[in-house]
Image (cartoon, rainbow, N blue to C red):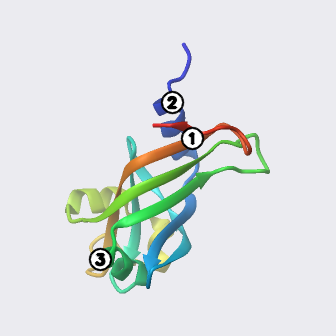
Amino acid sequence: MAQTLKDKIVELLSHHKVGTLATIRDNKPYSRFMMFNHDDLTLYTATNEQAHKAEDIAQNPHVHILLGYDHDSDHEHYVEIEAEASVEHSTAVKEKFWNEQLKHWIPSADDPEYLLLKLTPTTILYYEKPGSEPQEL
């Protein structure tokens, strides 16, 4: 059975955890590498409440995410995602997405400065490989 576009995107999100998150600061884009998790098509990324991105999102919740493409493997597919960012307050969800890799920035899931950003896609463009026409979901 052929994979649907949504299936391809969910599979990509499952295999590619590091990407860029761009916010707007002083009317200019600002990008940084982030670790992403997902629940279906909704992305989650952890940050510290003192980080600039938290301020940026409070001012403007529109973000851009770039995930995928690994030239060292056969994973040439990637996605560009426009999303609305919000703060996830659920303790259960925060615990679900906290992991040991975050210890450098957030010591534990119950750290008071641990902020989990929920990124709800408004547009997802899927590229099978660089230079290909995007498919929109």
N-terminal label among 2 and 1? 2
Spatial separation of the CA atoms under disc 3 and disc 2: 32 Å
The residue furthest right is: 72
Dot 2 amino acid type? Leu
Can residue 20 be seen in this snapshot? yes
- 47 sits to left or right of 134: left
Q: Position of residue 128 (x, y in %)?
A: 66, 37
Tally the numbered discs.
3
Q: Which residue sits furthest front?
A: 27
Where is residue 40 drawn, in percent x and y?
38, 41
> Which of the pair 103/42 is nearer the observer?
42
Residue appearing at x 52%, y 77% in the figure: 30
Q: What's the distance in space between the residues labelled 1 and 3, CA to CA? A: 28 Å
Q: Quadrant of residue 53?
A: bottom left
Residue farthest to the top, as pictured = 1
Is disc 3 placed on a helix, strand or loop?
helix
What residue lies at 40% left-to-right and 43% top-to-bottom? 41
Q: Which residue is identified by label 3?
A: 58
Question: What is the three-letter code of the residue carrying label 3?
Answer: Ala
Front residue (pair 58, 41): 58
Marks 3/2 in contact by CB < 8 Å: the verdict is: no
Report the front residue among 87 and 62: 62
Q: Point out the image quarter for the N terminus.
A: top right
Q: Which residue is mark 1?
A: 126
Does the residue at mark 1 contact the one at mark 3 (Cβ under 8 Å)? no
Q: Which mark is residue 5?
A: 2
